[in-house]
Image: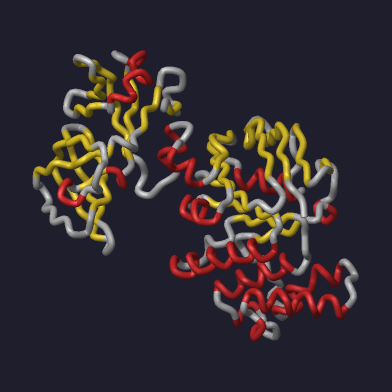
Amino acid sequence: MAGVTYEHVVKKFNDFTAINDLNIKIEDKEFLVLVGPSGCGKTTALRCLAGLEEVSSGNVIIGDRIVNDVAPKDRDIAMVFQSYALYPHMTVFDNMAFGLKLRHIPKAQIQKRVEEAAQMLGIEALLKRKPRELSGGQRQRVAVGRAIVREPKVFLFDEPLSNLDAKLRVQTRAEISKIHNRLQTTFIYVTHDQTEAMTMATRIAVMNKGVLQQLDTPQNLYDKPANMFVAGFIGSPAMNFFPMKVTKSGENLYVDNGTMTVKLPKEYTGTYANLVGHDVIFGIRPDDIHNPDFAPANIHGETVEATVDVTELMGNEIYVYLMNGGNNFVARVDPRSRYKIGEKVNMLFNMDNFHIFDPSDNPDNPVAIR
């Protein structure tokens, strides 16, 4: 078992920079998820670690060893691909055992490892079947089992659940988390699905356009995003953003855009006093916009008028899409709420949980100030 370090890693394809100065230290036994939109560099980063791509500069370190020039087979890693990559003419047993046979592991040990992995994954009854006789979820378990039997220092997962239906994806997600807890080995997992990242990871590395945006625990990413990209990517539905200007009246500060005015809590007066007159982005999550009739007790609420545009009943909650002048936003409200399209309503913003982003230095990705 070993930790992994990306040390100033750059990967270029001709003039295109896929990874730009990536620095991540992944602890031994950690479950790190690389997450971001398509093309953000997360899979390239994983392939550089696996040895399937050469780094343009910087170092990839497994344990205490720089592995830039080490062949993939000698890096002591195992990779689970999105496509499963099973041999169709081999049985499940032979697919799982194939890598061990190439390494000339004794037959008795191969048998033991395959049977133990199959039992862990609940596929003991499938060992004599061919891949074509398996469901998508069963094939995915075989691919994971093939990695487990190798007993590597590091497991790599490249969007392994993308081909599964929604129900099976949730089930397999839980199984992979259980496997990590049992094996106590370093897991590095790539996905574009922020829900997978939030539910599985010890820490999450959020990437965009080849650049690491933030590295932190799931809860800290949700509560304290470093910039507007992270705030919008983590959380579903996404955070609401409103272009505003910070204003002052008496001793109070407000964010205002002409059609919406929200008072900021007094304890933040000192934090934002230097922004009076400046353009900012005000952010608040749908979870923090409530129907006043069912709002949690003791929150610092500010009322905002809006018109109901669309409602989506989810069973245990309702998504309400609202309009206020040119401001469109979504709220997650109590399922007892009864809203009608076109109805004018008052919504309660929980100002214990808001975000201010300053676009002055980087208009494309304003940084958080709080």
The relative height of residue 211 versus residue 321 in the rendered view (above or below) is above
Measured as percent of width and height from the top left, residue 219 is found at 47, 45
Rendered image quadrant of residue 267? top left
Give the colour scheme of this rendering.
Answer: secondary structure
The picture quadrant where one finds residue 360 is top left
Does residue 135 appear to the left or right of 237 in the view shown?
Answer: right
Q: Is residue 168 left or right of residue 61?
A: left
Q: Report whether 28 appears left or right of 250.
A: right
- Residue drawn at point x = 18 percent, y = 23 percent: 258
Q: Position of residue 152 (x, y in %)?
A: 77, 60
* Residue in view at x 45 percent, y 36 percent: 224
Work out which quarter of the rendered image holds the C terminus and state it: top left
Q: Residue at x 36, y 13 (%)?
A: 274
Residue reaching furthest front?
298
- Residue 244: give x, y in percent of width and height: 28, 24
Inspect this view and state whether residue 148 appears: yes
Count of all numbered marks drawn on residues in the image: 0
Residue at the farthest left position: 343
Vertical side of 69 occupied by 171: above or below: below
| Depicted 181 relative to depicted 343: above or below | below
Q: Nearer the viewer, residue 19 or 125?
A: 125
Task: Tell me what residue is drawn at x 71 percent, y 58 percent.
Answer: 185
Q: Is residue 329 left or right of residue 280?
A: left
Please state the horizontal and vertical placement of residue 287, each as a whole percent of the image. 31, 47
Q: Identify the image quadrant of the N terminus.
A: bottom right
Along the line of sight, the residue nearer the viewer: 254 or 280: 254
User: Looking at the picture, does residue 23 appear above or below residue 100?
Assistant: above
Examine the rendering and report whether any part of residue 52 can be seen.
no
Give the camera-side residue of 4 and 293.
293
